[in-house]
């Protein structure tokens, strides 16, 4: 009897291992297969492959955002799978590394990309993980292009990090001004995760602008893994907040919205780019809450891209799941799409697939993307002066463009 | 500051504290009962709680809620039973440390299986109409679940105490917790008693998960870790092995934590709400290691 149980247990464990091993494979089947085939081809026919590292969270709190950003890159890769550099055709291969939305997993994910021999890295969604992984790319001499990591410290002090999105100080400025103009807000309650660079950075910038304009800012933080937001929201209400600013990860945003709905919070919510996500939209649908988010792209901005990505999502069940089960286009998808082409532009400009050459060419790269014109300043940040402010249409579960705010970039 | 002293704010904070405490109590009972009988800290218990939440999501997607709840309880009970049979029973005569390590292994297995099944994405718990209705209490809208929780917890605890004090299996449980070997010699089917403990613990954790996730609807594969740890602290606080102790500990932790979160933002202490719980654990372990109602004060289980 004992032996049978032991045997069964061993079997369970082996099966468990197989299952765990299969987990990442389901996502990357296509790539792993191509890696194998191309590698064999490489040795026999010498066909050229260039690898682009995709440094994104596909598990954890920001998985929903990371997957949508990857989706944009995959769509771009499906659209343009090859690139001609110096008269030779290279097949572009995406190499994935999951940073697990966590700063302690990010460095090992980054080094896995380095050892995979990628020429350039795209990502990540989330500033904290980008900062944690950044030094790995810098040490290996591989340039990285941040897609939607908005914290200034991602590129500041790292010569190898560029980014194509606007910065948090710009975003916070836009949101603070919006709150003052639209709601005549005097008191803002800001809630972020403690120790999260993204949340705290945005709140600090928001506070600066809002207080400079004569408002009062109440800041509060919750511990990582917190799930009870009712106390915070009740506090915001009792302290008389006119707006509630919650620049948090998607998972927290969903919970905050769900709990706010049951508390009947009347103050409008302001969110940063992370809140522009289907899951947040689903949480707020059918409630009386108001939510305004600043983001990079609004559906309808590039009709051709919209049509293309919608078709891609609708004809590919994996893409559909990654997008949260519907075909609403997230801004991060558009950004991921643009990032892929920026990487291709950089390779073309470099005339090489060597990381060092690409790094040298990146400062001069310009690209007209679906989310707007992209060019880099001397720090490596995108020169961007436009943010879209969207509001959630709670009756129809859709985003509506509220206003387009322009300001001085960074 | 002034506004924070308003009655409605204080009521809302206290109510959510009591409700959180009740949910933790349901988990804490599972820890404390298993410890009382097996002298094992079942580290997988928090993850069983998380799995109950996930199963809840998948089952309610398929069948109506009122049919789903019993099914979820059944599945989780089966899981708890199976974990005991597969991971703890073969180690009955092994050193206690081996069982503990096995429990940690089960905990990781459950978390990683959940990551595999959900794809690592946070899931949202379905809305159960009855629990999610809001009612007004002195001008504060409160979810019904917040009011139901403490009542339901009290009913369940009374039932459990009756089960332990009045029934045959309850008597067997008390006997096993007093002396494992002797009760075996007296003809008590120790394995059945232990299985019953796990079944009760898992069933209560499932009820806890329904209440907890109806209040805080996000479930990630690690969603069970924090509530599990806090419930464990509650069990230690009350004196591990003692059911009333665990319940009182859980209510106390729930209420204190919510009050700390609700303190004025200007004081900047809300982020220490978790730290408070664990500081409490250290204080208890150094000052009164047996907890409030430890070993000698009351019967175990």
Image: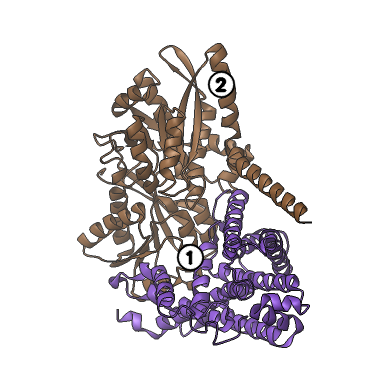
Chain colours: A brown, B purple
Q: Which residue is found at the position 61% from the left and 76% from the top?
A: B36
Specify whether A159 is left or right of B204: left
Say if residue A297 shows up in the picture.
no
Query: Of B225 and A277, which appears nearest the observer?
Result: B225
Specify whether B165 is left or right of A209: right
**Residue that carries the numbered disc 2 in the rendered image:** A38
Closest to the camera, between mark 2 and mark 1, is 2
Spot occupied by residue A396 in the image (x, y as percentages of width and height): 55, 56
Point out the tag, 2 or 1, that comes first from the N-terminus. 2
Specify whether B298 is left or right of A347: right
Q: How many marks?
A: 2
Q: How many residues crowd mark 1 within 10 Å: few (<14), some (14–19), many (20+)? A: many
Asked if both marks, 2 and 1, belong to the same chain, the answer given is yes
The disc placed on residue A227 is 1
Spot occupied by residue A11 in the image (x, y as percentages of width and height): 71, 47
Q: Quadrant for the N terminus of chain A, please.
A: bottom right
Q: Quadrant of residue B153?
A: bottom right
Specify whether A49 is left or right of A160: right
Spot occupied by residue B240 in the image (x, y as percentages of width and height): 54, 77
Q: Quadrant for the C terminus of chain A, please.
A: top left
Q: Is residue B182 above or below residue A199?
A: below
Spot occupied by residue B23 in the image (x, y as percentages of width and height): 56, 74
Q: Which residue is found at the position 28% from the left and 71% from the top?
A: B266
- Return the chain for callout 2: A
Q: Is residue A303 above or below residue B217?
A: above
Q: CA distance from mark 2 to mark 1?
A: 46 Å
The disc placed on residue A332 is none
Query: Of A199 and B269, which appears nearest the observer?
Result: B269
Mark 1, secondary structure of its residue: loop
Query: Of B128 and B15, which appears nearest the observer?
Result: B15
- Return the chain for callout 1: A
């Amino acid at each position: 009897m004992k032996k049978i149980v032991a045997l069964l247990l061993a079997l369970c464990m082996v099966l468990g291992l197989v299952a765990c091993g299969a987990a990442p494979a389901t996502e990357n089947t296509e790539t792993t297969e191509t890696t194998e085939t191309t590698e064999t081809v490489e040795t026999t026919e010498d066909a050229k492959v260039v690898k682009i590292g995709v440094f994104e969270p596909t598990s954890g709190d920001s998985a929903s955002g990371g997957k949508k950003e990857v989706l944009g890159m995959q769509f771009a890769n499906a659209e343009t799978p090859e690139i001609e550099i110096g008269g030779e055709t290279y097949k572009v291969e995406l190499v994935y590394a999951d940073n697990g939305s966590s700063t302690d997993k990010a460095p090992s994910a980054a080094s896995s990309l380095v050892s995979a021999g990628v020429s350039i890295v795209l990502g990540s969604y989330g500033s904290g993980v980008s900062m944690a992984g950044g030094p790995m790319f810098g040490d290996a001499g591989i340039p990285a292009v941040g897609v939607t990591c908005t914290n200034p410290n991602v590129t500041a002090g790292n010569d190898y990090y560029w980014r194509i999105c606007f910065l948090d100080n710009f975003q916070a400025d836009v949101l603070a001004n919006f709150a003052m103009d639209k709601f005549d807000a005097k008191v803002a309650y800001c809630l972020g995760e403690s120790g999260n660079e993204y949340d705290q950075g945005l709140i600090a910038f928001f506070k600066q602008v809002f207080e400079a304009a004569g408002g009062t800012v109440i800041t509060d933080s919750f511990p990582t893994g917190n799930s009870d937001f009712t106390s915070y929201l009740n506090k915001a209400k009792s302290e008389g907040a006119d707006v509630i600013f919650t620049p948090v990860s998607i998972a927290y945003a969903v919970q905050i919205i769900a709990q706010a709905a049951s508390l009947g919070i009347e103050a409008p919510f302001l969110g940063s780019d992370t809140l522009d996500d289907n899951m947040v939209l689903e949480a707020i649908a059918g409630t009386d809450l108001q939510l305004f988010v600043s983001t990079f792209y609004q559906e309808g901005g590039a009709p051709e891209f919209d049509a293309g990505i919608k078709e891609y999502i609708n004809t590919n069940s994996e893409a559909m799941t990654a997008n949260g089960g519907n075909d609403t286009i997230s801004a991060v998808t558009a950004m991921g799409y643009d990032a892929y082409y920026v990487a291709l532009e950089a390779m073309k400009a470099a005339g090489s697939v060597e990381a060092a050459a690409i790094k040298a060419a990146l400062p001069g790269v310009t690209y007209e993307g679906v989310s707007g014109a992209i060019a880099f300043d001397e720090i490596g940040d995108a020169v961007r002066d436009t943010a879209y402010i969207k509001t959630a249409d709670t009756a129809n579960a859709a985003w509506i463009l509220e206003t387009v705010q322009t300001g001085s970039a960074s | 500051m002034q506004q924070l002293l308003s009655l409605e704010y204080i009521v809302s904070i206290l109510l959510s504290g009591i409700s959180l405490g009740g949910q933790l109590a349901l988990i804490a009972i599972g820890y404390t009962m298993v410890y009382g009988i097996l002298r094992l800290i079942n580290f997988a218990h928090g993850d069983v709680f998380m799995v109950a939440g996930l199963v809840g999501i998948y089952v309610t997607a398929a069948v109506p809620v009122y049919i789903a709840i019993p099914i979820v309880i059944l599945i989780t009970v089966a899981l708890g039973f199976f974990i005991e049979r597969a991971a703890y029973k073969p180690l009955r005569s092994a050193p206690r440390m081996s069982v503990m390590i096995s429990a940690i292994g089960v905990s990781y297995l459950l978390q990683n299986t959940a990551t595999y099944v959900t794809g690592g994405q946070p899931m949202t718990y379905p809305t159960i109409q009855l629990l999610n209705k809001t009612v007004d209490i002195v001008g504060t809208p409160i979810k019904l679940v917040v009011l139901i929780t403490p009542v339901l917890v009290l009913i369940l605890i009374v039932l459990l105490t009756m089960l332990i004090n009045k029934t045959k299996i309850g008597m067997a449980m008390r006997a096993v917790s007093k002396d494992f070997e002797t009760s075996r010699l007296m003809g008590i089917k120790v394995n059945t008693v232990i299985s019953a403990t796990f079944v009760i613990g898992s069933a209560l954790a499932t009820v806890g998960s329904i209440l907890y996730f109806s209040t805080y609807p996000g479930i990630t594969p690690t969603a069970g870790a924090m509530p599990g740890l806090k419930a464990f602290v509650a069990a230690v606080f009350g004196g591990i092995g003692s059911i009333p102790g665990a319940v009182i500990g859980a209510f106390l932790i729930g209420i204190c934590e919510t009050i700390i979160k609700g303190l004025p933002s200007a004081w900047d202490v809300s982020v220490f709400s978790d730290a408070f719980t664990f500081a409490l654990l250290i204080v208890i372990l150094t000052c009164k290691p047996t907890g409030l109602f430890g070993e000698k004060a009351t019967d175990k289980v």
